[in-house]
Amino acid sequence: MTLNSATTTFLRPETDTRTSRCGCARKNASAEHVALSLDVDILDALRALGEDWETHFNAILRDWLRSNKPVAA
């Protein structure tokens, strides 16, 4: 279940039909759309991972977080 902060109700992922800010259906209700600036060479390398590069990028970041303790800003 996910918490819908706008109405403070719980939604089951299979019935959560909310859309992302761009208006397209969310693939993953626990994910959030963000804007991020990356160096061109890094973005090219990520896109070279294939059509599902954003999922791979998420996995890379998750793996890094498991191995490294983030430093509070």
Image: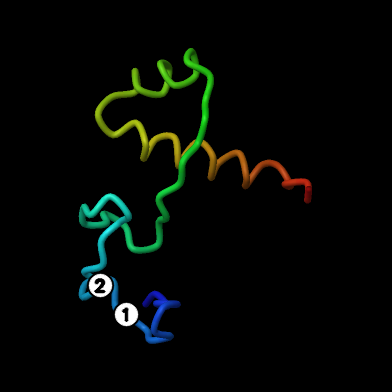
Q: Quadrant of residue 48?
A: top left
Please name the residue that numbered disc 1 is placed on: 11
Query: Which residue occupies 39% across, 75% down?
Result: 2
Query: Which residue occupies 52% across, 30% down?
Result: 37
- What is the number of the mark on residue 33? none
**Looking at the image, what colour scheme do you see?**
rainbow
Q: CA distance from mark 2 to mark 1?
A: 6 Å
Q: Is residue 53 above or below residue 43?
A: below
Please name the residue that numbered disc 2 is placed on: 16
Residue 27 is situated, as x and y percent measured from the top left of the image, at 26, 54
**Depth check, front residue: 35 or 69:** 35
Residue 56 is situated, as x and y percent measured from the top left of the image, at 39, 35
Secondary-structure class at tag 1: strand
Query: Which residue occupies 41% across, 23% down?
Result: 46
Tell me whether circle 2 and circle 1 mark residues in contact (CB < 8 Å). yes
Residue neighbourhood size for the residue with mark 2, other residues' Cα within 10 Å, grouped as few (<14), some (14–19), many (≥20): some
Q: Which is more N-terminal, label 1 or label 2?
A: 1
Secondary-structure class at tag 2: loop
Residue 40 is situated, as x and y percent measured from the top left of the image, at 47, 15
